[in-house]
Amino acid sequence: MTVVLGRTFFPDSADELRLLVTSRGLEPVGLMQAKRAKPDPATFLGAGKIEELGQLAKEAKADCLVFDIALSAAQQRNIERAVNLPVLDRTQLILDIFRARAKSREGRLQVELAQLEHLSTRLVRGWTHLERQRGGLGKTGGPGEKQIELDRRMIGVRMKQLREQLKKLERQRGTQRRARERGDRLTVSLVGYTNAGKSTLFNQLTRAKSYAADQLFATLDTTARRCWISDEETVVMSDTVGFIRGLPHQLVEAFKSTLDETVHADLLLHVVDAGSVVREDQIREVNKVLEEIHADKIPVILVYNKIDTTPLEPEIVRNPDGTPKAVMVSALTGAGLDLLRSAIGEFAGRWREENPNEPRELEDWEIDEDDPRIALQGTTHDWYA
C-alpha cells in the first residue's frame, strides 16, 4: 500500500516498496495506491479506503498488509481490526530487514535496541485485554501494576543493558580508529542510498570479499580495509550501511556508533545509482541523514555508479577551481575505477599539504612521570649522555 500525502510524490515508491517486501522475505500479491491531503487520525486512509483495501487483500488471498508509510500504534491497531489481517508499516518493515541482515555482535545489539525503542511505544497493542494485577497479600489487596507497566520496565532494563554493551564496543571502535589515525593515513568512507552498489565498489577498490547483492540493505556492518591509490598513496576505506527514504529515527540513533566511521572520515565517496530516475531525490535523502549525524561538513566526491546501464562514459567532472566534483564509474565492469583512484589521490595530496604530519601529543595513559625519557621530553638535555 503506497500513499501520496499532500504534494509529496516519489515516482519510485511502488518499486522501492516491492524491493523492501521481497528483502523481508515476503511475496507481493497486489498493490494499491492512494492519495490524501492529510492523514486520517484513526486509519490514516479513512474508513472507505480501508474497506476497499480489505476487499482487495481478501481477493488476492494476502496474509498481511504492508504500508509504505509510518503508522501510529492506534492507526495500525484500527486497520488490523478492520481488515482482520496483520499490518506492517514502513518502520517495522525496515527494522525486520535489519534484524535479518545483522551479522556482527554490534549490529545485532544495535538492531535489538532499535526494535525495543519502537516496541515501547506500542505495548498497548498486546495487553488491552488485561486488567491490573492484584496487589498485596490479602484477598482485598488494592490494584497493583498493569501488565503493560511491568513490560515497559523490563524493556527499559534491557535497553539500558544494550546501551552499556554498545558503549563498550564504541570505545573499542574508537581505539581502533585512533590507531589508524596515528598511522597517518587518509580515511575514506563510502556512503549512499541502499542498493547503489557501494559494497561492489568497495570490493573492487580494496579486493575485499564483503557481501554484495542486488537487494536493499545487503550490508549493515561497517568494514574497513586498506585501499591502494598509487605507489605513493594508500588510504583506509570503509563501507557503511546504506540509507533510504524514511529511515527510522530509532535506527539512526542505534547505529550512531557504526556511523561514526562516516563522521570521522576525511573524505566521503557518495555513491549514486546513475541509472535511477530518482537519483537526485536519493542524493537529497542521503544528505539529510549526513546532516542528522553531523557529517555534512566533510568533503564529498559524488561517484555515479552503474554507468554500464546508461549512455554515460567514464570521466571526472570538476568544480570551477579544478577539484574533482564527481566521477562516472561502473563497479561491475571496472570502467572508470582508475579515474576514481586519481580523484582520491588528488584530494589526498591537498589533504596532506593542509594536514602536515607533526609529532602527536602523548595521551594520558602513555605518560609515566617516573620515566626519565618522558620527564625530559621537549628539553635539550640528552639523557643518554
Image: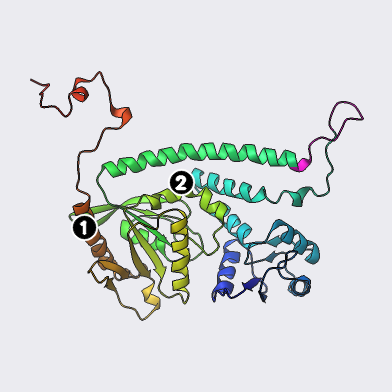
Direction from residue 314 to residue 149 in the image, left or right: right
- Most prominent secondary structure in the magenta stretch? loop
If you read the primary sequence from the N terminus, does the residue marked by circle 2 or circle 1 appear first?
Answer: 2
Where is residue 75, by image quadrant? bottom right
In this view of the protein, can residue 324 be seen by the observer? yes
Determine whether 378 is above or below 256 in the image: above
Q: Position of residue 311 (x, y in %)?
A: 36, 81
**Quarter of the image that includes the N terminus:** bottom right
Q: Is residue 247 placed above or below 113 in the rendered structure?
A: below
Marks 2 and 1, Cα distance to the nearest angstrom? 29 Å
Write down the residue under mark 2.
Answer: 257
Amino acid type, mark 2: Ser
- Residue 362: name its quadrant: top left
Q: Tell me the SS state at disc 1.
A: helix
Q: Is residue 110 left or right of residue 42?
A: left
Q: Which residues are magenta?
A: 135-148
Left or right placement of residue 322 versus residue 58 in this view? left
Rendered location of residue 74, percent (x, y): 74, 58
Q: How crowded is the residue under tag 2: few (<14 C-alpha within 10 Å), some, or many (20+)? A: many
Verify CB contact (< 8 Å) between mark 2 and mark 1: no
Q: Residue furthest bottom?
A: 311
| Residue 310 rendering spot, x and y as whole percentages | 39, 79
